[in-house]
Image: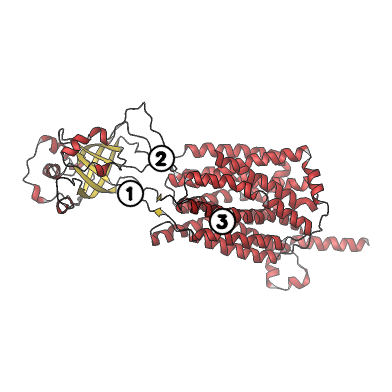
Amino acid sequence: MAAEAKAKDKEGEAAADGGGGDEAANTLGAKVVKRLHINPNLLMLKVTLFLLYGAVASLLPYLTIHMQSVGLTVEEISIIYLALPFTTFLSPPLTGFLVDKFGQYKPVVVLAFILNAAFHHSLLLIPPTETPGEVPPAYIARHPATGIMEVWWSPCPSRECPDEEELEVVLERCFSHCELLMSASHHSQPFNDSSEWTNATEDPLLMMLAINDTINSGEVNNDDFHFLLDMHPDLADPTENMGIEVEAQSNRTLEMFRARFSDRVLWSAGVNVTALEEEDLRCGGVALASNLSGPAIRRMATVCPLQRCSFRAGGPEKCPSQYKESDDSTFYLYFVLRFLGNACMNAGVTMIDPIALTMIKKYGGEFGRERIFSTIGMAIFSPITGFLIDYNSRQVGYTDYSAAFYAHDILLMTAAVSIMAMPIGVKVPNDDLLRDVWRILKMPHVTIFIFFLFLLGNYWGYIESFLFLYLKELGAPNYLLGLTLTVGTLSSMPFLFGAERITKKVGHVNIIVIAFFSHSLRLIGYSLIDDPWWSFPFEAMEASAVHLMWVAAATYCTLLAPHNLLASIIGILGMAHFSLGECSRSVI
């Protein structure tokens, strides 16, 4: 008997170290697996984690901005996120209950994957209402009375004016804005610094502006107008923030175009003031120098004191896309589809952790090391999806999110196939499941543990819901949004590789406390940045705020509950963190 037990122990050790038996060792794949010290029984688990989290990272981060593209307002987006926890918090414990009750992992998880792909792909069928953003135009204005020349523009409703005291800009394709005193053929003719104006009268004020050598040296295109601007000191703040109108400060005296060029002056000069009313002309400055000659300025003032031009250099960035508000039917349709899709996503994702823990207990290994493959999937597929979205969008002229949905579907269906190939086995059903779960939940330390995971979910949910909207307001391209996930996941890999040792040394509870401080620092950091690229250092804090925290939480469940209740307890924990914990993001 002792010899048999010893032989069985050696077989188990060989399996944990990568041995698969004499028959498996004869295959090339088994030899490679053994050489790489990979446990062959956990190989499909690694593949499933890689594909599943790659699918989630390909779609989920882009769903918030996709909601904008179909015409949902920020308020409607908040309502959806506020309602999602109440419609999905039952799915993880329900699937955990079914798995524990009937002892079958595979059918429950595969069905959740299939329904997840079907409901989420249906969102792609809702037509977009996006109007692509453009670079705002510039207006060259010369005051009829004082002769002072200025350049004004709108930086987009959500953007601030430049901080520089002096700013160099290059304008092109200038057209007269006087639609009252000129015929259509007259005012549609572009203004150029042509030689036919050289005989116009010059005066000292106009000649003072023609200081060519203070602007860029070299040959100047006749269609390009270079200006060195002395920016006004008290310019207005943005009028919008993430689509929500911001009230202007009433106690400030602001420099604005309509204050320096009154309606009476503009009307008398023949400027179409009505066409200017929708322009947010709050950034501008006085021209200190220009490559325009004095006669050209005189000619421009004679034709019309206001010219509408395009920026060639030095101007504002391209404005974010504008979205036409959709009707109520679109909101309700999106809500129902997202409701069902999110329920299935939570059900499938939450069940992967008890599957992994069950297999690790059976075949050996470490939970943190297996989770590394989920982070690799997120790091790879999220930026690839972002690049594909940007590439396709340039081809069609608007933001095309179809790449995210198709990548999600393909990866998820492949993950369903790998689930079926996993040697999970059959669980022993628990006949007294509800009674045993209730007995565990009545323990004070378990209740407190779940409550703290709920609070952490508030931090996580708020960042996940609105970070991409915030970065888009800062001008981030879609590929940068994907790279934020790459930075967050790659930074966690060293911690996940040694997660078991870190957890034993630091303690499960202490790691969760560290996660609170990490989330707080992330939120403070995001509030201080004005460039989306500066989000990377704070995304790297996900290593302790999210990834290491969840490893500590999941492994702590193995200490709190018996093995036959593991799926139910992790399901309840997922409900508290990923569903109920997200409620505050919408309330705020």
Name the front one of labels 3 and 1. 3
Image coordinates for residue 201, horizontal then vertical, percent? 6, 41
Look at mark 3 in the image and give the residue it sits on. 337
Choose the circle earlier in sequence order: 1 or 2: 1
Q: Position of residue 130 (x, y in %)?
A: 41, 54
Which residue lies at the image location 50% right of the left edge and 40% below the top edge?
A: 526
Tag nearer the camera, 2 or 3: 3
- The answer to whether 58 appears left or right of 94 in the picture is left
Name the outermost residue toward the top: 251
Q: Which amino acid, by three-letter code, is at mark 2?
A: Glu
Whichever of labels 2 and 3 marks the residue nearer the N terminus, that label is 2
Residue 129: image quadrant is bottom left
Q: CA distance from mark 3 to mark 1?
A: 35 Å
> How busy is the neighbourhood of tag 1: few (under 14 within 10 Å), some, or many (20 plus)?
some
Type of the residue with mark 3: Leu
Which residue is depicted at the point 71% across and 62% down?
106
Q: Which mark is residue 135?
A: 1
Crowdedness near tag 3: few (<14), some (14–19) or many (≥20) residues, C-alpha within 10 Å: some
Residue placed under numbered mark 2 in the picture: 240
- Specify the label residue 207 is tagged with: none
